[in-house]
Image: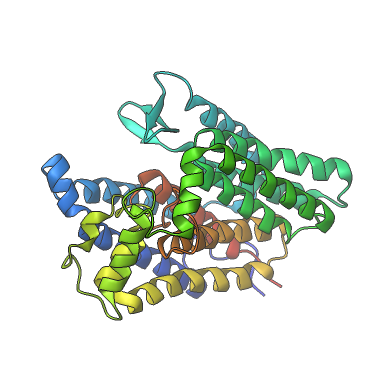
Amino acid sequence: MRDRNAGSAQLNPTDLFLFGLIIALVAFGLNILLASSSFMAREQFSDPYFFLKKQAVAAFLGFLGLLAMTQIDPDRYRNLVWPLYAITLLMLLLVFVPGIGRRAGGANRWIAVAGLSVQPSDFAKVALVLAIARIYSQAKQVDFKLSLMTLLIIAAPAFLIAIEQDLGTAIHLVLVASTLLFFTRYPLTMQFAALVSVVAVVAYVIVKTPFRLGRIKAFLDPWESRYDAGFQLVASMKAFLAGGLSGRGLGEELVRHHLQERHTDFILAIVAEDLGAIGVILLLGAYFTITIYGLVLASRLRDDFMRLMATGFLLCLILQVIINSAVTMGLLPTKGINLPLVSNGGTSLLVYLIMCGMMLSALRREQI
Protein backbone atom coordinates (compact mmCIF):
# COMPACT_ATOMS: atom_id res chain seq x y z
CA MET A 1 0.00 0.00 0.00
CA ARG A 2 1.31 3.42 -0.90
CA ASP A 3 1.12 6.52 1.19
CA ARG A 4 -1.77 8.75 0.11
CA ASN A 5 0.38 11.78 -0.62
CA ALA A 6 3.54 10.00 -1.64
CA GLY A 7 5.20 10.70 -4.94
CA SER A 8 3.85 14.21 -5.47
CA ALA A 9 7.31 15.56 -6.20
CA GLN A 10 8.82 12.72 -8.23
CA LEU A 11 7.82 10.08 -10.74
CA ASN A 12 7.57 6.48 -9.54
CA PRO A 13 8.06 3.43 -11.84
CA THR A 14 4.36 3.35 -12.74
CA ASP A 15 4.42 7.01 -13.70
CA LEU A 16 7.61 6.57 -15.72
CA PHE A 17 6.18 3.67 -17.73
CA LEU A 18 2.96 5.46 -18.67
CA PHE A 19 4.73 8.80 -19.03
CA GLY A 20 7.27 7.23 -21.39
CA LEU A 21 4.57 5.69 -23.59
CA ILE A 22 2.64 8.96 -23.76
CA ILE A 23 5.71 11.00 -24.72
CA ALA A 24 6.72 8.32 -27.24
CA LEU A 25 3.30 8.64 -28.91
CA VAL A 26 3.64 12.42 -29.13
CA ALA A 27 7.18 12.17 -30.54
CA PHE A 28 6.03 9.60 -33.07
CA GLY A 29 3.10 11.83 -33.98
CA LEU A 30 5.41 14.75 -34.76
CA ASN A 31 7.49 12.57 -37.07
CA ILE A 32 4.54 11.07 -38.93
CA LEU A 33 2.93 14.53 -39.14
CA LEU A 34 6.00 15.87 -40.95
CA ALA A 35 5.95 12.90 -43.31
CA SER A 36 2.25 13.39 -44.06
CA SER A 37 2.06 17.17 -44.32
CA SER A 38 5.37 18.54 -45.63
CA PHE A 39 4.37 18.40 -49.31
CA MET A 40 0.98 19.98 -48.64
CA ALA A 41 2.47 22.64 -46.33
CA ARG A 42 5.07 23.55 -48.97
CA GLU A 43 2.34 24.02 -51.58
CA GLN A 44 -0.07 25.96 -49.36
CA PHE A 45 2.27 27.97 -47.11
CA SER A 46 5.69 27.74 -48.83
CA ASP A 47 6.98 26.13 -45.64
CA PRO A 48 7.22 22.33 -45.37
CA TYR A 49 7.41 22.62 -41.57
CA PHE A 50 4.29 24.78 -41.16
CA PHE A 51 2.09 22.14 -39.50
CA LEU A 52 4.99 20.62 -37.61
CA LYS A 53 5.89 23.95 -36.00
CA LYS A 54 2.34 24.57 -34.78
CA GLN A 55 2.02 21.03 -33.45
CA ALA A 56 5.42 21.25 -31.73
CA VAL A 57 4.31 24.39 -29.87
CA ALA A 58 1.12 22.63 -28.74
CA ALA A 59 3.19 19.60 -27.68
CA PHE A 60 5.52 21.79 -25.62
CA LEU A 61 2.63 23.56 -23.88
CA GLY A 62 0.87 20.24 -23.37
CA PHE A 63 4.01 18.74 -21.88
CA LEU A 64 4.20 21.62 -19.40
CA GLY A 65 0.50 21.10 -18.63
CA LEU A 66 1.07 17.39 -18.07
CA LEU A 67 3.91 18.03 -15.63
CA ALA A 68 1.89 20.71 -13.84
CA MET A 69 -1.09 18.37 -13.42
CA THR A 70 1.10 15.63 -11.93
CA GLN A 71 2.22 18.05 -9.22
CA ILE A 72 -1.29 19.19 -8.24
CA ASP A 73 -3.19 17.31 -5.56
CA PRO A 74 -6.12 15.75 -7.50
CA ASP A 75 -8.41 16.48 -4.54
CA ARG A 76 -8.45 20.07 -5.79
CA TYR A 77 -10.22 19.01 -8.98
CA ARG A 78 -13.40 18.26 -7.03
CA ASN A 79 -14.09 21.93 -6.36
CA LEU A 80 -13.43 22.88 -9.98
CA VAL A 81 -15.91 20.45 -11.54
CA TRP A 82 -18.99 22.65 -11.88
CA PRO A 83 -17.19 25.91 -12.75
CA LEU A 84 -15.31 24.01 -15.47
CA TYR A 85 -18.53 22.42 -16.75
CA ALA A 86 -20.26 25.83 -16.91
CA ILE A 87 -17.30 27.44 -18.69
CA THR A 88 -17.24 24.59 -21.21
CA LEU A 89 -20.94 25.08 -22.05
CA LEU A 90 -20.30 28.79 -22.47
CA MET A 91 -17.41 28.09 -24.83
CA LEU A 92 -19.59 25.71 -26.85
CA LEU A 93 -22.13 28.52 -27.23
CA LEU A 94 -19.50 31.10 -28.18
CA VAL A 95 -18.68 29.26 -31.40
CA PHE A 96 -21.98 30.58 -32.78
CA VAL A 97 -21.23 34.23 -31.87
CA PRO A 98 -20.11 36.29 -34.90
CA GLY A 99 -16.63 37.69 -34.45
CA ILE A 100 -15.70 35.02 -31.89
CA GLY A 101 -16.75 31.74 -33.45
CA ARG A 102 -14.91 30.62 -36.58
CA ARG A 103 -16.60 28.59 -39.29
CA ALA A 104 -14.57 26.24 -41.47
CA GLY A 105 -15.46 23.24 -43.59
CA GLY A 106 -19.16 23.93 -43.10
CA ALA A 107 -18.96 23.62 -39.31
CA ASN A 108 -18.86 25.98 -36.32
CA ARG A 109 -16.27 24.26 -34.13
CA TRP A 110 -13.71 26.90 -33.19
CA ILE A 111 -13.31 30.03 -31.10
CA ALA A 112 -10.81 32.49 -32.56
CA VAL A 113 -9.22 34.97 -30.16
CA ALA A 114 -6.11 37.04 -30.87
CA GLY A 115 -5.24 34.88 -33.86
CA LEU A 116 -5.47 31.63 -31.89
CA SER A 117 -8.13 28.99 -32.57
CA VAL A 118 -9.50 26.74 -29.82
CA GLN A 119 -11.91 23.83 -30.23
CA PRO A 120 -14.21 23.80 -27.16
CA SER A 121 -15.44 20.25 -27.81
CA ASP A 122 -12.06 18.94 -26.64
CA PHE A 123 -12.53 20.61 -23.26
CA ALA A 124 -16.03 19.11 -23.04
CA LYS A 125 -14.44 15.67 -22.66
CA VAL A 126 -12.60 16.76 -19.51
CA ALA A 127 -15.60 18.58 -18.07
CA LEU A 128 -18.02 15.70 -18.61
CA VAL A 129 -15.73 13.05 -17.13
CA LEU A 130 -15.11 15.21 -14.05
CA ALA A 131 -18.85 15.89 -13.66
CA ILE A 132 -19.75 12.19 -13.73
CA ALA A 133 -16.89 11.36 -11.37
CA ARG A 134 -18.04 14.05 -8.92
CA ILE A 135 -21.71 12.98 -8.98
CA TYR A 136 -21.17 9.25 -8.56
CA SER A 137 -18.36 9.50 -6.04
CA GLN A 138 -20.84 11.25 -3.73
CA ALA A 139 -24.07 9.40 -4.54
CA LYS A 140 -25.12 6.89 -1.91
CA GLN A 141 -27.99 5.64 -4.06
CA VAL A 142 -29.12 6.36 -7.59
CA ASP A 143 -32.79 7.31 -7.90
CA PHE A 144 -34.77 8.46 -10.92
CA LYS A 145 -34.03 12.15 -10.25
CA LEU A 146 -30.26 11.59 -10.22
CA SER A 147 -30.48 9.37 -13.30
CA LEU A 148 -32.38 12.06 -15.19
CA MET A 149 -29.94 14.76 -14.07
CA THR A 150 -27.07 12.61 -15.36
CA LEU A 151 -28.71 12.30 -18.77
CA LEU A 152 -29.18 16.08 -18.94
CA ILE A 153 -25.54 16.71 -17.98
CA ILE A 154 -24.44 14.42 -20.80
CA ALA A 155 -26.98 15.69 -23.32
CA ALA A 156 -26.20 19.42 -22.93
CA PRO A 157 -22.62 19.41 -24.32
CA ALA A 158 -23.38 16.57 -26.76
CA PHE A 159 -26.29 18.52 -28.25
CA LEU A 160 -24.26 21.73 -28.61
CA ILE A 161 -21.42 19.84 -30.30
CA ALA A 162 -23.85 18.06 -32.63
CA ILE A 163 -25.41 21.31 -33.85
CA GLU A 164 -21.89 22.58 -34.54
CA GLN A 165 -21.99 19.93 -37.31
CA ASP A 166 -19.56 17.74 -35.37
CA LEU A 167 -21.64 14.60 -34.95
CA GLY A 168 -18.56 12.37 -34.65
CA THR A 169 -17.30 14.15 -31.52
CA ALA A 170 -20.81 14.25 -30.05
CA ILE A 171 -21.12 10.48 -30.50
CA HIS A 172 -17.67 9.99 -28.97
CA LEU A 173 -18.67 12.10 -25.96
CA VAL A 174 -21.86 10.09 -25.42
CA LEU A 175 -19.96 6.80 -25.76
CA VAL A 176 -17.39 7.88 -23.19
CA ALA A 177 -20.08 8.95 -20.71
CA SER A 178 -22.16 5.81 -21.29
CA THR A 179 -19.18 3.50 -20.85
CA LEU A 180 -18.04 5.35 -17.73
CA LEU A 181 -21.50 4.89 -16.20
CA PHE A 182 -20.91 1.12 -16.25
CA PHE A 183 -18.30 1.77 -13.56
CA THR A 184 -20.91 3.48 -11.36
CA ARG A 185 -24.21 2.52 -9.72
CA TYR A 186 -26.19 3.94 -12.63
CA PRO A 187 -29.14 1.55 -13.37
CA LEU A 188 -28.71 -0.61 -16.46
CA THR A 189 -32.36 -0.10 -17.46
CA MET A 190 -31.80 3.65 -17.72
CA GLN A 191 -28.61 3.07 -19.69
CA PHE A 192 -30.42 0.82 -22.15
CA ALA A 193 -33.28 3.31 -22.57
CA ALA A 194 -30.80 6.14 -23.13
CA LEU A 195 -28.88 4.05 -25.66
CA VAL A 196 -32.02 3.31 -27.66
CA SER A 197 -32.92 7.01 -27.63
CA VAL A 198 -29.45 8.06 -28.80
CA VAL A 199 -29.44 5.51 -31.62
CA ALA A 200 -32.89 6.73 -32.75
CA VAL A 201 -31.78 10.38 -32.70
CA VAL A 202 -28.55 9.68 -34.58
CA ALA A 203 -30.40 7.62 -37.19
CA TYR A 204 -32.91 10.43 -37.68
CA VAL A 205 -30.16 13.06 -38.06
CA ILE A 206 -28.32 10.91 -40.61
CA VAL A 207 -31.44 10.23 -42.68
CA LYS A 208 -32.41 13.92 -42.69
CA THR A 209 -28.89 15.15 -43.59
CA PRO A 210 -27.94 14.42 -47.22
CA PHE A 211 -24.15 14.56 -46.80
CA ARG A 212 -24.25 12.19 -43.81
CA LEU A 213 -26.52 9.80 -45.69
CA GLY A 214 -24.00 9.97 -48.52
CA ARG A 215 -21.25 8.91 -46.11
CA ILE A 216 -23.28 5.87 -45.07
CA LYS A 217 -23.78 4.87 -48.71
CA ALA A 218 -20.07 5.43 -49.39
CA PHE A 219 -19.20 3.27 -46.39
CA LEU A 220 -21.36 0.43 -47.66
CA ASP A 221 -19.88 0.60 -51.18
CA PRO A 222 -16.88 2.98 -51.30
CA TRP A 223 -15.73 1.93 -54.78
CA GLU A 224 -19.09 2.82 -56.29
CA SER A 225 -18.67 6.42 -55.05
CA ARG A 226 -14.86 6.57 -55.21
CA TYR A 227 -14.92 9.90 -57.06
CA ASP A 228 -17.37 11.46 -54.63
CA ALA A 229 -18.29 10.62 -51.00
CA GLY A 230 -16.12 7.49 -50.98
CA PHE A 231 -12.98 9.25 -52.23
CA GLN A 232 -11.28 9.49 -48.83
CA LEU A 233 -12.03 5.93 -47.83
CA VAL A 234 -10.78 4.49 -51.12
CA ALA A 235 -7.58 6.56 -50.86
CA SER A 236 -7.10 5.29 -47.31
CA MET A 237 -7.52 1.67 -48.44
CA LYS A 238 -4.95 2.23 -51.20
CA ALA A 239 -2.50 3.60 -48.64
CA PHE A 240 -2.93 0.49 -46.48
CA LEU A 241 -2.39 -1.74 -49.51
CA ALA A 242 0.68 0.24 -50.60
CA GLY A 243 2.31 -0.17 -47.19
CA GLY A 244 2.00 -3.93 -47.02
CA LEU A 245 3.61 -5.58 -44.03
CA SER A 246 6.65 -3.37 -43.39
CA GLY A 247 5.86 -0.14 -45.26
CA ARG A 248 7.72 1.96 -47.80
CA GLY A 249 9.64 4.19 -45.40
CA LEU A 250 8.79 7.61 -43.99
CA GLY A 251 7.79 10.03 -46.72
CA GLU A 252 8.63 7.69 -49.60
CA GLU A 253 5.28 7.01 -51.24
CA LEU A 254 2.86 9.26 -53.14
CA VAL A 255 -0.45 7.52 -52.45
CA ARG A 256 -0.86 9.91 -49.49
CA HIS A 257 -1.44 12.87 -51.81
CA HIS A 258 -4.93 11.59 -52.60
CA LEU A 259 -5.89 11.88 -48.92
CA GLN A 260 -7.25 15.32 -48.17
CA GLU A 261 -7.20 14.80 -44.38
CA ARG A 262 -3.98 12.81 -44.27
CA HIS A 263 -2.45 14.84 -41.41
CA THR A 264 -5.61 14.79 -39.25
CA ASP A 265 -8.43 12.23 -39.45
CA PHE A 266 -6.62 9.79 -41.79
CA ILE A 267 -3.10 9.93 -40.41
CA LEU A 268 -3.25 6.20 -39.57
CA ALA A 269 -3.34 5.53 -43.32
CA ILE A 270 0.01 7.35 -43.59
CA VAL A 271 1.37 5.16 -40.79
CA ALA A 272 0.20 2.11 -42.76
CA GLU A 273 1.76 3.36 -46.00
CA ASP A 274 5.09 4.33 -44.45
CA LEU A 275 5.53 1.70 -41.74
CA GLY A 276 3.16 -1.04 -42.87
CA ALA A 277 0.92 -3.30 -40.83
CA ILE A 278 3.74 -3.75 -38.30
CA GLY A 279 3.81 0.00 -37.62
CA VAL A 280 0.02 0.15 -37.24
CA ILE A 281 0.00 -2.79 -34.82
CA LEU A 282 2.80 -1.29 -32.70
CA LEU A 283 1.06 2.10 -32.61
CA LEU A 284 -2.33 0.69 -31.63
CA GLY A 285 -0.57 -1.62 -29.18
CA ALA A 286 0.89 1.39 -27.38
CA TYR A 287 -2.59 2.89 -26.98
CA PHE A 288 -4.06 -0.35 -25.64
CA THR A 289 -1.11 -0.86 -23.28
CA ILE A 290 -1.67 2.58 -21.75
CA THR A 291 -5.40 1.91 -21.43
CA ILE A 292 -5.31 -1.59 -20.00
CA TYR A 293 -2.46 -0.88 -17.60
CA GLY A 294 -4.11 2.36 -16.52
CA LEU A 295 -7.52 0.73 -15.99
CA VAL A 296 -5.97 -1.98 -13.83
CA LEU A 297 -4.32 0.65 -11.64
CA ALA A 298 -7.47 2.80 -11.56
CA SER A 299 -9.58 -0.17 -10.40
CA ARG A 300 -7.43 -0.38 -7.27
CA LEU A 301 -7.98 3.22 -6.19
CA ARG A 302 -9.86 3.63 -2.91
CA ASP A 303 -11.18 7.09 -3.76
CA ASP A 304 -14.19 6.81 -6.11
CA PHE A 305 -13.65 10.26 -7.58
CA MET A 306 -10.04 9.45 -8.51
CA ARG A 307 -11.03 6.04 -9.84
CA LEU A 308 -13.80 7.41 -12.07
CA MET A 309 -11.71 10.36 -13.23
CA ALA A 310 -8.76 8.19 -14.29
CA THR A 311 -11.09 5.61 -15.86
CA GLY A 312 -12.97 8.31 -17.78
CA PHE A 313 -9.83 9.83 -19.26
CA LEU A 314 -8.56 6.40 -20.34
CA LEU A 315 -11.93 5.67 -21.96
CA CYS A 316 -11.75 9.02 -23.81
CA LEU A 317 -8.40 8.01 -25.24
CA ILE A 318 -9.11 4.44 -26.29
CA LEU A 319 -12.64 5.02 -27.65
CA GLN A 320 -11.37 7.85 -29.86
CA VAL A 321 -8.53 5.61 -31.06
CA ILE A 322 -11.01 2.82 -31.87
CA ILE A 323 -13.37 5.15 -33.75
CA ASN A 324 -10.58 6.81 -35.74
CA SER A 325 -8.92 3.48 -36.60
CA ALA A 326 -12.23 1.90 -37.64
CA VAL A 327 -13.01 4.86 -39.90
CA THR A 328 -9.56 4.78 -41.49
CA MET A 329 -9.83 1.04 -42.14
CA GLY A 330 -13.35 1.29 -43.56
CA LEU A 331 -15.06 -0.38 -40.60
CA LEU A 332 -17.15 2.71 -39.74
CA PRO A 333 -18.57 5.55 -41.86
CA THR A 334 -16.31 8.59 -42.24
CA LYS A 335 -16.57 11.13 -39.42
CA GLY A 336 -14.36 14.03 -38.36
CA ILE A 337 -12.46 12.61 -35.40
CA ASN A 338 -8.68 12.50 -35.17
CA LEU A 339 -6.13 10.10 -33.68
CA PRO A 340 -5.30 11.45 -30.19
CA LEU A 341 -1.70 12.46 -29.41
CA VAL A 342 -0.67 11.77 -33.02
CA SER A 343 -2.92 13.66 -35.48
CA ASN A 344 -2.50 17.34 -36.23
CA GLY A 345 -4.61 19.48 -33.89
CA GLY A 346 -3.19 21.76 -31.23
CA THR A 347 -6.22 21.90 -28.92
CA SER A 348 -6.68 18.13 -29.01
CA LEU A 349 -3.02 17.47 -28.22
CA LEU A 350 -2.94 20.05 -25.42
CA VAL A 351 -6.13 18.74 -23.79
CA TYR A 352 -5.11 15.08 -24.02
CA LEU A 353 -1.72 15.78 -22.44
CA ILE A 354 -3.42 17.65 -19.60
CA MET A 355 -5.82 14.72 -19.17
CA CYS A 356 -2.84 12.36 -19.05
CA GLY A 357 -1.27 14.50 -16.32
CA MET A 358 -4.49 14.43 -14.28
CA MET A 359 -4.73 10.68 -14.79
CA LEU A 360 -1.14 10.14 -13.59
CA SER A 361 -1.85 12.33 -10.59
CA ALA A 362 -4.90 10.23 -9.70
CA LEU A 363 -3.13 6.91 -10.23
CA ARG A 364 -0.48 7.99 -7.76
CA ARG A 365 -3.05 7.92 -4.99
CA GLU A 366 -3.44 5.17 -2.43
CA GLN A 367 -4.48 1.83 -3.92
CA ILE A 368 -6.06 -1.24 -2.37
Is 11 in front, or is 104? 104
Say if residue 70 shows up in the picture. Answer: no
Residue 325 vertical position relative to residue 245 in the rendered view, above or below: above
Most extreme residue toward the top is 98
Which image quarter holds the N terminus? bottom right
**68 to the left or right of 184:** left
Residue 181 image point, x, y percent: 72, 56
Is 137 in front, or is 287? 287
Say if residue 57 shows up in the picture. Answer: yes
Q: How many marks?
A: 0
Which image quarter holds the C terminus? bottom right
Most extreme residue toward the front is 224
- Give me the residue at 37% from left, 65% from top: 25
**302 to the left or right of 335:** right
Is 251 in front, or is 126? 251
Residue 172 image point, x, y percent: 56, 51
**Structure colour scheme:** rainbow
Is 36 in front, or is 352? 36
| Image quadrant where residue 85 sits | top right
- Give me the residue at 47% from left, 28% from top: 95
Residue 118 image point, x, y percent: 41, 36
- Give me the residue at 53% from left, 63% from top: 318
Residue 64 vertical position relative to residue 281 in the rendered view, above or below: above
